[in-house]
Image: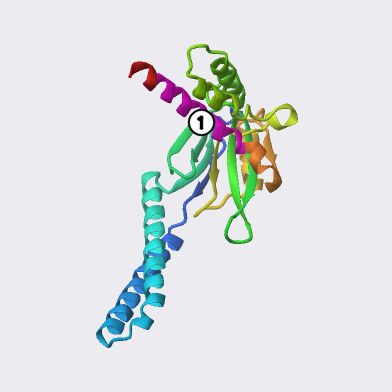
Amino acid sequence: MTTEPPDGSFPAPYVARFRRLPPILMVAAGTLALAMSVRWIASAALHGHPDRVPPPLALAVASIVSAALGAGRLARGRRTGRVAFAVDADGILLVTWPDGVPRRFGWDEVSALVLFSRRTEFVHGTVRCVGVRLHPTAPGSPERHRAELEEAVSRHDLPLDVWERLRRLDRGPSGAGLEFAVSVHAEARGWRYDAARVRETMRLHAPGVPVVREPSERYYDLVGWRAAQEELRSALEDAELRHWC
């Protein structure tokens, strides 16, 4: 699908990498704050001031969380050579969120690249996301999910409670919402992407694959159906286990 220039060279890939400095600072700051909080707690206990313990204790917990998050991001970056997202002649590489697993999608699987965002829960703001929309016939597409769910609901060998569980599941988006519902996505945490450069690289490597930007209000429409997909798998596995017990 890549268009080869007359001179035989291929367009340069687009690569977004995990940043190294922020997680290093998180680990360093967390370790320093933890050491200070432990010192405060020990001093309060030694001098008989238990009323001074709770704030340092809360700081110690926050420090451990910060250091652990930073260490986790460093480890994730090492596993993937610090590559978070790439577009090249072979397809798209995406380090999925939240499991941090790198996944490669060839151009024969991809029907669209979707740029969107979601609103954060605890702090006002948004997190930018990159999503891959697979072809309708590919495993993991919303069309395949709907077909598998319809097939499962029509089965007569399922326990009644499992059948009821499946009947209540979301069958996924329909109409206009179905076109760009993403099969896999990554949140741009610890890395950034340049939308204009992504579009240009996609145009060179895969001119037939659109790059679509969706507003944060459509976040659930884009990814929400995947929760029902996981529930479908879980329900069928449960029914299978009961069958063999």
Q: Is residue 60 above or below residue 194?
A: below
Q: How is the image coloured?
A: rainbow
Q: Position of residue 15 (x, y in %)?
A: 52, 45
Q: Quadrant of residue 115?
A: top right
The residue to which callout 1 is attached is 231
Quadrant of the frame with the C terminus? top left
Please give the range of residues in magenta. Answer: 223-241
**Extreme residue toward the bottom, this view:** 47
Q: Is residue 169 left or right of residue 61?
A: right
Q: Position of residue 32 (x, y in %)?
A: 35, 73
Asked whether residue 97 appears in the rendered view, the answer is yes
Q: Is residue 111 left or right of residue 140?
A: right
Quadrant of the frame with the N terminus? top right
Q: Quadrant of residue 204?
A: top right
Which element is circle 1 on? helix
Q: Residue at x 61, y 39 (%)?
A: 201
Q: Is residue 47 above or below residue 149?
A: below
Q: Residue at x 67, y 27 (%)?
A: 208
Q: Residue at x 67, y 30 (%)?
A: 173
Q: Position of residue 163 (x, y in %)?
A: 53, 21
Query: Crowding at label 1, few (<14), some or many (≥20) Cα neighbours within 10 Å?
Result: some
Residue kind at label 1, given as amino acid type: Glu
